[in-house]
Image: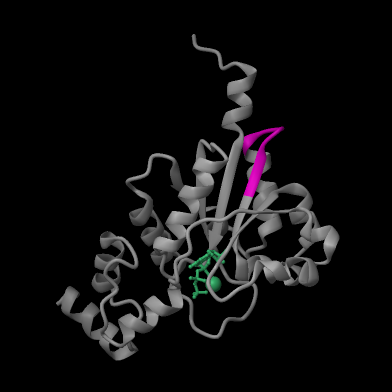
Amino acid sequence: MYTMSNDEIAWSRRVAIMGGTFDPIHYAHLLIAEDVRQRFQLPRVLFMPSGNPPHKREYEVSPAEDRYIMAVLATADNPRFAVSRLEIERSGPSYTIDTIRQLKAKMGPGTQVLFVTGADAVLDIVTWHEPDAILDEATLVAVPRPGFDLNELDETLGQERASKVTVIDAPLAEISSTMIRERVREGRSIRYLTPRPVIDYINKRGLYRSRVEARETMEEATS
Ligand code: ATP
Ligand code: MG
């Protein structure tokens, strides 16, 4: 029987959560996750598609199952990436702190959780549920994002909270899910913005097109 050494156990109990709506997942999400994975020598990065977004959003979010499948398709070729169903299967609003606690309980005592956010998300964290608990129970890792200034971290979060955030410099990519949804709606190419299997899935399901167009796609597929 092979018994893990204490060092190996400690290593295996480190995980990064890449949280998001992922509507759809795109290359910026993937490259950030890979950068964090390598930099912190993590055995696993867990993509965590949100369930019901707690804030009312300005657009109708795609079904959780579609967002989950696209995340699985996009990460399938990376053995250190996995997609979790934790939030999409939990009823009620998706609170990050609940996810962090649930994951720690599942992975056992001594689990270290890194929670990865882009600059926009980390600057917004004071509006999240229990921000101080998030900062205490996970290591918040923030990456830059075009259009958002991480130098504002101190001012926006206050010095004490800001000091708990680990800022790293991942490659910048000016890609957003909003941009992809708009491009699909306008009939423009989304090639090289997200992996091919995700594009195929968007087309197959008629996601992000007008309701009429999407219904036509589904009718065509089932007739
Ligand atoms: P939307 O436009 O629908 O808000 P999004 O591109 O912001 O989509 P989300 O699912 O909202 O993607 O974001 C998930 C996480 O990824 C957040 O922490 C967000 O800050 C981060 N993120 C997304 N795109 C980028 C990017 N281009 N650069 C840095 N971080 C990003
Ligand atoms: Mg966003």
Q: In which quarter of the view is residue 54 placed?
A: bottom right
- 87 displayed left or right of 70: right
Q: Which of 25 and 169 is in front in this view?
A: 169
Q: Give the range drawn in magenta.
A: 107-114
Up-down: is 14 above or below 94? above
- Residue furthest left as drawn: 223
Q: Residue 1: horizontal and vertical position, in percent? A: 49, 9
Residue at 33% x, 55% y is 73
Numbered circles on residues, count: 0
> For residue 126, which quarter of the picture?
bottom right
Percent x, y for residue 162?
77, 60
Quarter of the image with the C terminus is bottom left
Q: Can residue 84 be seen in this view?
A: no
Q: In this view, does 38 lie above or below 27?
A: above
Q: Is residue 204 left or right of residue 170?
A: left
Q: Can residue 119 be seen in this view?
A: yes
Residue 44 lies, in percent from the top left, at 50, 40
Please tell me which residue is depicted at 64% across the width and 19% down the height of the picture.
6
Q: Quadrant of residue 207?
A: bottom left
User: In this image, 177 relative to 17: left or right?
Assistant: left
